[in-house]
Image (cartoon, rainbow, N blue to C red):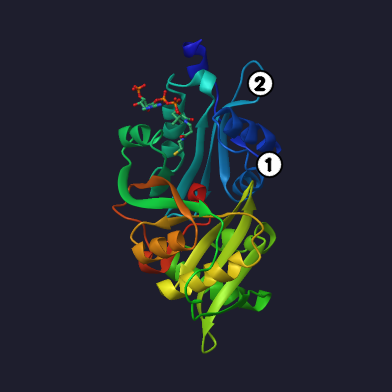
Amino acid sequence: MPTSVAALPIRRLTLDDLHSCADLSEDRGWPREEHKWGLLLSAGTGYGIDDPQGKGLIAGCVVTSYGPGLSAVGMVLVAERHARQGIGKRLMRHVLKEYEGTPLTLHATPNGQPLYEQLGFATTGRAEMVRGPFMLSGRTPRVSTRPATADDLQAILKLDAEVFGQDRTHIIARLPAFADQLRVAEDAGALTGFAAAWPNMDTYVVGPLIAHNTETAKGLIASLAVEADRPLRTDIDVRHKELLTWLKAQGLESIAHNAVMTHGIPALPGDWTRRFAPLTVAAG
Ligand SMILES: CC(C)(COP(=O)(O)OP(=O)(O)OC[C@H]1O[C@@H](n2cnc3c(N)ncnc32)[C@H](O)[C@@H]1OP(=O)(O)O)[C@@H](O)C(=O)NCCC(=O)NCCS
């Protein structure tokens, strides 16, 4: 069995594979996250291996490309029944070959980290996943925020490119449809940050979160939380200690730490001081 599995073809995934991808997540004890899979499969490129017995996928992952400067790998999954047979390594080698010459990044779980290290990825940062019902305590952040409108798009894209360090138009332009809320912060008419919140199973994920300082990041989160009908979740770069401390004081708890890894570059491009949280750890 292992020999034949090792020879199975790797194919591109499409939106038609969404349910099989969610089944794969479930197989590994992850939530199905169909809304997120839908975004990743439409904005990015999925790779998968079909079960020869017709039982869906035995492995999959998605790559979100930001041009020649960066691509992000996420949702790397191998069905439990085929674990430790070299399939994860083969899938990742395929991705490395397809994106040869392009710097790669990913957020690694402790489960995936040894595999990525074997393939030349290095840990260049960490993100802390926090989750819980948000209850504003202490003073309200002094930041002016409002819902984004179509007129804000160009300014959002400009700020995002500066802070993310790559052109993310294909992702940012999808936010109004993907997210429940997209809000901007401004000071004297100038854009000082933006953040989205989108539904993911039983949580409401805050990301991307871009802000010119921590107070602005707090104001954006607090304003998004007003309409949240479930616990918030976000993945904060651990260098943003003040924001993490504040989030915990507002009721969120630390759930996990993930390693931010890169391949082909010593650190992520852009400006981490204004980049607080990714859209999703699966898209960099
Ligand atoms: C991580 C994952 C994709 C690895 O897939 P896999 O096909 O089982 O991995 P491989 O057989 O190709 O193993 C490659 C190497 O990774 C390491 N590895 C794999 N599973 C591991 C585990 N459970 N614990 C520690 N190391 C592990 C080993 O070093 C292994 O090499 P070895 O077998 O020669 O020792 C798979 O375990 C999985 O789907 N896990 C759940 C989802 C997840 O955490 N994904 C990673 C997201 S970042």
Q: Nearer the viewer, residue 150 or 226?
A: 226
Q: Nearer the viewer, residue 245 or 138?
A: 138
Three-letter residue code for mark 1: Leu
Three-letter residue code for mark 2: Lys
Residue position marked by numbered label 2 in the rendering? 55
- Residue 11, given in percent of the width and then of the height, sits at 58, 31
Dot label at residue 15: 1
Q: Nearer the viewer, residue 276 or 57?
A: 276
Name the image quarter holding residue 176: bottom right
Residue 284 seen in the figure: no
- Say above or below: 114 vs 189: above
- Residue 276, given in percent of the width and then of the height, sits at 43, 63
Residue 113 seen in the figure: yes
Name the image quarter holding residue 169: bottom right
Rendered residue at 48%/18% (across/down)? 6
The secondary element bearing badge 2 is classed as loop
Rendered residue at 60%/32% (across/down)? 26
Q: How many discs mark residues in the rendered view?
A: 2
